[in-house]
């Protein structure tokens, strides 16, 4: 397996692209920038299966020339938004371990930050493998164990002596993201291989400095307000009222990128894997 390390300029170009969608939501623009930069090293063509497709806006941004795309999402509301996007020829409202498609009918599969949320990961990977043509590829982004281990806000609250509050924050963080598979890179590789894939390349995303700052920002964004909603509901209008915010946050990202010393130990990863021919 080859490991590819992104360059600072690539991540910043990724941010420039994704800020058109998430310019005033720092946790999303920060994370998606790394994914976008990673995906630009690959091509998806032919018939494509998008696992956990959502509203399709990010897919369109990354793959504007993809025209034969089928989506799968178990959330009917997300699927409805995806249909309205015009990105997909069809969307199945279905769990990903039960995809209503014929075997060997797709050239490529794509799963953007969805596999870590799947309750039946082994079944999901088996279904993706079944749906792919011989030597078909799966391109995906996932979170690693560091996503949980580097969670700063609960640690800070715990150090301040409020362990019960810290435990509540940890539980809500896991519940919000529905993290069932925050696996180390080695275990992700083992899961792919067990499902019949060969891992061709791995790109680490969001190493320690970026990763820890991202988790802290995401923790704060999703803190539940006592009167309902999230803290992000308060700060988003403030950011959105300032047209200079996306450009200024880019400078913050550039500073965080320049502080990285180890680009291999990360809270996320992008994998390119291929179905092993029978």
Image (cartoon, rainbow, N blue to C red):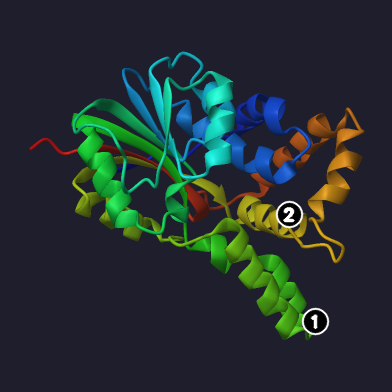
Residue 42 seen in this snapshot: no
Classify residue 243 as left or right of residue 209. Answer: right
Q: Which numbered circle lies on residue 217? A: 2
Q: Quadrant of the N terminus?
A: top left
The percent position of residue 146, horizontal first and vertical second, equals 52, 62
Q: Secondary structure at mark 1?
A: loop
Location of residue 58 with respect to 74 vertically, above or below? above
Q: CA distance from mark 2 to mark 1?
A: 19 Å
Q: Quadrant of the C terminus?
A: top left
> Which residue was labeled with disc 1?
160
Neighbours of disc 1 within 10 Å: few (<14), some (14-19), many (20+): few
Classify residue 223 as left or right of residue 96. Answer: right
Q: Residue at x 42, y 14 (%)?
A: 67
The percent position of residue 29, horizontal first and vertical second, equals 68, 38
Location of residue 225 with respect to 72 vertically, above or below? below
Q: Residue at x 59, y 64 (%)?
A: 175
The percent position of residue 276, horizontal first and vertical second, equals 15, 39
Front in this rendered view, residue 39 or 258: 39
Residue 273 seen in this snapshot: yes
Q: Secondary structure at mark 2?
A: helix
The percent position of residue 120, horizontal first and vertical second, equals 35, 57
Q: Residue at x 50, y 20 (%)?
A: 87
């Amino acid at each position: 397996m080859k490991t590819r390390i992104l360059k600072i300029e690539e991540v910043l170009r990724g941010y420039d692209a994704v800020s058109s969608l998430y310019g005033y939501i720092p946790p999303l623009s920060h994370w998606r920038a790394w994914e976008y930069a990673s995906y630009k090293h690959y091509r998806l063509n032919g018939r494509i299966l998008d696992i956990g497709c959502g509203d399709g806006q990010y897919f369109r941004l990354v793959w504007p020339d993809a025209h034969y795309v089928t989506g799968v999402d178990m959330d009917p509301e997300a699927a409805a938004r995806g249909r309205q996007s015009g990105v997909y020829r069809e969307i199945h409202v279905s769990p990903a371990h039960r995809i209503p498609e014929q075997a060997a009918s797709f050239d490529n599969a794509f799963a953007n930050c969805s596999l870590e949320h799947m309750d039946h990961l082994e079944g999901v990977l088996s279904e993706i493998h079944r749906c792919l043509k011989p030597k078909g590829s799966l391109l995906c982004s996932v979170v690693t164990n560091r996503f949980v281990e580097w969670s700063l806000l609960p640690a800070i609250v715990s150090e301040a002596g409020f362990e019960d509050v810290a435990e509540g924050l940890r539980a809500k963080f896991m519940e919000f993201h529905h993290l069932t598979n925050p696996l180390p890179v080695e275990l992700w590789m083992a899961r792919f291989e067990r499902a019949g894939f060969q891992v061709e390349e791995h790109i680490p995303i969001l190493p320690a400095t970026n990763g820890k700052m991202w988790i802290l920002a995401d923790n704060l964004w999703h803190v539940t307000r006592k009167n309902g909603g999230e803290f992000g509901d308060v700060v988003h209008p403030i950011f959105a009222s300032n047209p200079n915010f996306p450009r200024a946050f880019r400078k913050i990202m550039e500073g965080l990128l320049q502080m990285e010393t180890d680009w291999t130990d990360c809270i996320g990863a992008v994998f390119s894997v291929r179905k092993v021919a029978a």
